[in-house]
Amino acid sequence: MNKKPKAVYLLRPYAYDLIYGPEERRDISSLAEVLEPVMTMENWLKYPGICQQVEVIFSGWDMPLVDEVFLGTFPQLKAIFYGAGSIRGFATDLLWDRDITVSSAYRANAIPVCEFTVAQIVLATKHAWRLASETRTSRRFAASNSLVLPGMYKSVIGLISLGAVGRMIAERLSQYDVQVIAYDPFVESAEAKALGVDMCSLEEVFQRSDVVSCHTPWIKETEGMLTHELFMSMSHGATFINTARGAVVDQPGLIAALYKRPDLYAMLDVTWPEPPPPESPLYTLPNVWLTPHIAGSKGMECHRLGRTMVDELERYLSGEPLRFQILRDKAMVMA
């Protein structure tokens, strides 16, 4: 493309500054003619004259659904650069039928989740949070010879789903002396072998692992897929980590298992609902470590998402293949 394409920002107001910092906005403005104002899900329909000119949208959290009204309002739209993760919230068949290019910062968004999860896995194999809590309560250290901890040598780490995050974690875990097993019905054996992962049934992942880490996308088919029976089948002293979505867990079943099995531990960065109601046992169970959905991109990490979209715009304008383009057949299963 020789002429600068006309572009707008369309996303949640606070996400504009978080994702597209001063440097990212400067570089986008050097490559595209950015039209004002910054639009949101609530107000974009108020600017039909501007929307009719737009060829490129820079978006993030709260991108509107791409339906007939949307496409009728943006008749010149050719590309959406989504500075966040999954596009399931706005993608439709109409989007693909119009042959609109879509790129997402899903891999950039996977980086902090991977870092957070691997840190949790290391701590989990040392039973760090359980021992920290017990130490605070008892005001003494447990005798070293009484501690039976898996540690990271020869431990079995189970991953549920090998999407962008799961694959990245598998790659990071190759630096440790652990065995990585995984459940994902969509992964071929050759892919798993390249990742150094042994594929298993979901039941086997729960039964064999010292740590089970969930990275399953939330779709109708995965709601409540992690059941009470699976949690009850975990090995003694095992830990369950969830940085994906709370709705994939049978939460009452998990809570019941944690009551019955005080040897188990759950590290939950996500719940359903989110946050849990004030009366939820998740706040008081001694074998739960609860965090407020912090594994994904936060603070300056969000600028990585915007920078990824700047780089994709450069490739798009030069006619190079995009690194993070989302195609129709991958859109609904991407974690």
Image (cartoon, rainbow, N blue to C red):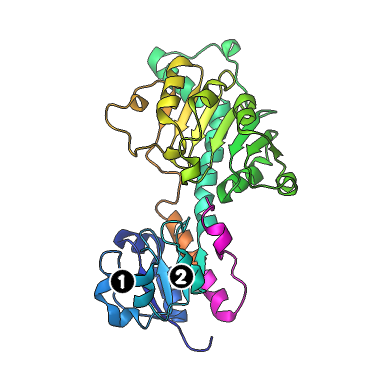
Label 1 neighbour load within 10 Å: few <14, some 14-19, many 20+: some
| Left-right relation of 38 to 310 | left
State which region is magenta: 310-335
Q: Nearer the viewer, residue 58 or 126?
A: 58
Residue indicated by mark 2:
80
Q: Is residue 32 visible?
A: yes
- Name the spot of residue 34 as percent of width and height, x first: 38, 79
Image quadrant assignment for residue 147: top right
What's the residue at 48%, 14% (across, down)? 141
Position of the N terminus by quadrant: bottom right
Q: Is residue 127 shown above or below 313?
A: above
| Left-right relation of 255 to 108 | left
- Name the spot of residue 187 as percent of width and height, x first: 66, 47
Q: Is residue 8 magenta?
A: no
What is the three-letter code of the residue carrying label 2?
A: Ile
Residue 38: image tag: 1
What is the three-letter code of the residue carrying label 1?
A: Val
- Name the spot of residue 281 as percent of width and height, x first: 34, 24
What's the residue at 58%, 60% (across, down)? 329
Residue 213: image tag: none
Image quadrant assignment for residue 66: bottom left
Q: Is residue 16 shown above or below 280?
A: below
- Name the spot of residue 113 as percent of width and height, x first: 50, 46
